[in-house]
Image (spheres, rainbow, N blue to C red):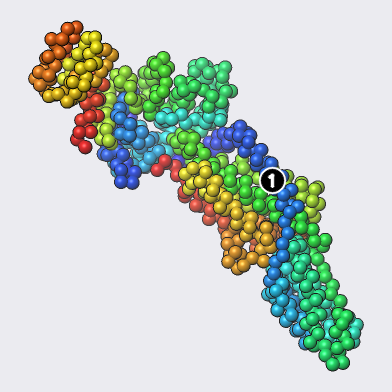
Amino acid sequence: MTALAIDVHGLTKRFGRKVAVDHIDIAVPERQVWGFLGPNGSGKTTTIRMLCGLFKPDAGQGTCLGHDVLKDPGAIKREVGYMTQRFSFWEDLSIRENLEFVARIYAIAKRKEKIDATLESLGLAARQNQLAGELSGGWKQRLALAACTLHAPKLLLLDEPTAGVDPEARREFWEQIHHLSQEGLTVLVSTHYMDEAERCDRIVYINAGHIIARGTVGEVIEQSGLITFLVEGSDVRQFLPELQGKPGVEHVAFFGAALHVSGHDRALLEQTVAPLRNRAGVDVNEQTPSLEDVFIHLQGGKKDAQ
Amino acid sequence: MSRGISLGRLFAILMKEFIQMRRDRGTFAVMIGVPVLQLFLFGFAINTDPRYLPTAIHVADDSRYARSIAAALKNSEYFDIVAVARSQAEGDRMLDEGQVSFVVTIPVNFARDLIRGISPELLIQADASDPSAAANALAAISQLATSALKDDLVGPLAIRASPPPFTAIVQRRYNPEGITAYNIVPGLIAVILTMTMVMVTAVAITRERERGTLENLLAMPVHRFEVMLGKIIPYVMVGYIQLSLILLGARFIFHVPMLGSLSLLIATAGLFIAANLALGFTISTIATTQLQAMQTAVFFLMPSILLSGFAFPFRGMPVWAQWVGQAIPATYFLRIVRGILLKGNNWPEIWPNIWPLLIFLAVVGTVALVRYRTTLD
């Protein structure tokens, strides 16, 4: 069995009477990249903050990099890199000054060389004296990643690092993440993007403070037991209202130029979509549900349960 | 959070704070400009008329005349006889320490000389470092004594009743010309330091919280001492710049006398600055927004100006207001500054005003450390 970078049980956080995170267990083996998914307000940020010592859990126990999350947040802080959801470096410090601050805090050896090298690899060497606040979203995100990995952490906790960043920058960002993981880093990254979830070794899906699905992408899809019919053709969008709420149809979503009609009862679904097969220019085929279909189902299913 | 305090990390925070201070030119300009503005505004503007000033009486010649004068002083609104000095030296000491504002001395042979018509001297020594506090009382004293003696000087002595049978000798101590600026300008040091020191540190943590950078700072392995000291030390320096500016203005524009030791003043100013910064930092850990922090700072600032003895003579305030004033560091520092500059006070005389500052610093500093959270909870 490989060593676990994160190993927590029953982690719970309450804010007043609201339970933000309710007894969750997460065990992330070293050197893996895990995706943390769930709707807004589901408890992703709260969980990450408990892992890096920013929140004291109300219940639960466990370790991060072998250090007790309750007793030794100081040791965790030294070895973890945490990238906040909102850019949280100092906008009134220059790019270089921000990196220097971080380097001094972690007492990084050969500070100047290290910062020069980081600026070079970021492609920010020429702009190092610009204020961080003047950078665009994509550059801020790159600076933040560079700054929170400067002290060579063993575990990276990234809270929606690519929100509001263009696709090209996102792609580069993920290349960087995989590069870091090959060097031995463990990564837990929260995201709303399906393509990003698919780049992870494992995903964890949290809703209303509970983990309701986990595993590889394939496993999560499989576990959902969902059946999806793909309705393709010109103008299939018009069928959306008439399919909703029909027997066997749990949800209908429009992706690309096709409708995804999903549910758990194949026979009923088949019955419902059958009339569409007769329409001219419309193709109906069963296919493996996409991760997004599963997430819509997980989110909807939870809502019904409440 | 990490074990022990690291100078390297403290230095990191110091550097960051200095850079941010330098970038925030507007605030820096206010910190330097405001003292200068206040110096001129208050230095030229304030005046007042207090009553019931603590007075010591030294009776070297006990007679019905001496008792009448003492009674008259007691009955007047200006004087409150709080002590009897057994010697001239004791009276001087009381004046030096600020226990009393006046010492009235009835000299040896007062009664004999009075009856003989030799016009004995009635000595009134006033603490004129606050000239407004002393002026009206001094104007009243000669009149009071004359009318008090009128009832005693009857029969054959009636002829002695007027003109006044004694000579009132008035000694205005510390500020003989009664120049208001001598009192206001040293007082400004206390007010200006309170104002800027409390305000700038009050927003220190709330600003990080509002900008979202606190989360980042807390996720790093920094000790709360490092953050607190790192945020306070730059402003200690700003405080000393302000102190130098006001002292220069006091010396060269208002020609305030500087009798005592400047190094003593600078040392005690450090204590006062630290007390205010600790208070500002505490506000910073309690307030959730910068606006709240500012409002709390102003809430503290008002009594520092109005109830510390700066705007009005401390002794002229009602007792409850004096109680409030005694909880404010500015009250003590005001006395220290005036004592050192105008009276030439040294350690023994200012000590009664030093220990309350030490207690304030210890209590508020502890609250700041306890309140400062290393988590976002």
Image coords of residue A158 (percent x, y): 38, 27
- Residue A288: x percent and y percent? 19, 16
Q: Is residue A72 left or right of residue A112?
A: left
Query: Residue B29: which quarter of the image?
Result: top right
Instruction: Look at 59% across and 50% down and name the residue there.
Output: B276
Label 1 resides on the chain identified as B
Left or right relative to B218: residue B53: right
Q: Are there few (<14), some (14-19), or many (20+) residues within 10 Å of tag 1? A: many
Which quarter of the rendered picture does the N terminus of chain B lie within? Answer: top left
- Pick whichever, B220 or A167, lies toward us: A167
Q: Nearer the viewer, residue B172 or B361?
A: B172
The quarter holding residue A182 reads top left
Residue beneath the point at 66% across and 53% down: B190
Q: Nearer the viewer, residue A237 or A94?
A: A237
Residue A107 shows up from this direction: no
Q: Residue at x 17, y 16 (%)?
A: A229
Q: Secondary structure at mark 1?
A: helix
Q: Which residue is mark 1?
A: B35
Q: Position of residue B185 (x, y in %)?
A: 73, 53
Q: Is residue B326 above or below residue A187?
A: below
Q: Which residue is located at x 21 percent, y 37 percent?
A: A306
**Relative to A80, is B294 above or below?**
below
Q: Relative to the observer, which residue lies in front, A272 or A229?
A: A272
In the image, residue A110 sits, relative to residue B317, either above or below, namely above
Extreme residue in the top direction: A281
Task: Examine the rendering and report whether any part of residue A214 can be seen.
Answer: yes
- Residue B366 x, y percent position in the rendering: 51, 52
Disc 1 residue type (three-letter):
Pro
* Quarter the C terminus of chain B occupies: top left
> Residue A63 vs residue B167: left or right?
left
